[in-house]
Image (tube, rainbow, N blue to C red):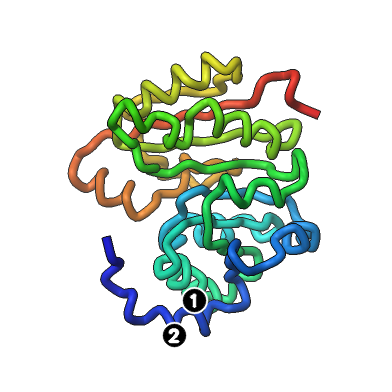
Amino acid sequence: MRYRGAHHLPEWLEQGAAVLRDSRKDDLTEVFRAIDKPICIEVGCGKGGFIRQMAERWPDIMFIGIDKVPSVLAKGAANSVEQGLANVLFIIGDIEHIAPKIEDHRVQQIFLNFSDPWPKARHENRRLTAPEKLAMYARLLAKDGVIEQKTDNLPFFDWSVESIERTNWDIVRVERGFAAKDEPPSELSSQFIQTEYEQKFRGQGIPIHYLCARPPAESRV
């Protein structure tokens, strides 16, 4: 589907150029090597509302949003520059193509917010919590690193829990229908920050499901 604001793409690309990279053209190996802060990644970040909120609260962490759709990422980059955020970066591309450019155990946290559930069984390997994806995250995550998932899709959520358990990850927390957090965030966690989708779904009374998991012990440094 074409993003309805895509006609602004040239404008957003120019405005957001300082915090926008393209995996098809840019040397991402050097980009990641140049980052001197702990790194957190949101896979499928859309317009970046979530990571902009995170960046405001934790200025000593670099928040990286990855998405395949140039127009939505460009909009997020332009908004970040307008806000004066120095600790965000948006990368156009697929996490599977970007991950090889990142050093082992370089990432502190990976956020999977309202990912495409790919409901057909033949598309299971495309889900962001499929075993192959989990193996990729395990290589990227630091010793104490975790993934966090939020979704409104309960069948997808239950499948994700089973996938994580099958691949010997440690489940830190699973909460079906978790309540919105009103208190100020006291820890680096997606449970305190609502994406645009979460705000919309909660407004409609749709339950939101949350999990946090850590890679198998043998994969940690």
Cβ atoms at labels 1 and 2 below 8 Å apart: yes
Q: Nearer the viewer, residue 92 or 42?
A: 92
Which of these two is toward me, 116 or 172?
116
Quarter residue 133 falls in: top right
Q: Judge left or right: residue 8 versus residue 17.
A: left
Q: Secondary structure at mark 2?
A: helix
Query: In the rendered image of this protein, does residue 86 appear above or below residue 175?
Result: below
Report crowding for label 2: few under 14, some 14 to 19, many 20 or more residues within 10 A (C-alpha): some
Q: How many marks?
A: 2
Furthest toward the left, the residue is 204
Query: Within 10 angstroms of label 1, few (less than 14), some, or many (20 or more) residues?
Result: many
Q: CA distance from mark 1 to mark 2?
A: 9 Å
* Element under disc 1: helix
Identity of the amino acid at label 1?
Ala
Residue designated by label 1:
78
Q: Is residue 158 above or below residue 185?
A: above
Residue 14 position in % (x across, y down): 52, 84
Placement of the N terminus among the 4 image quadrants = bottom left
Residue at mark 2 = 11
Q: Marks 1 and 2: which is nearer the front?
A: 2
**Residue drawn where x is 73% and y is 63% of the image:** 31
Query: Amino acid type of disc 2?
Result: Glu
- Image-quadrant location for residue 196: bottom left
Say above or below: 194 vs 143.
below
In the drawing, does residue 25 fall left or right of residue 209? Answer: right
Where residue 83 appears, as percent x and y from the top left, is: 52, 75
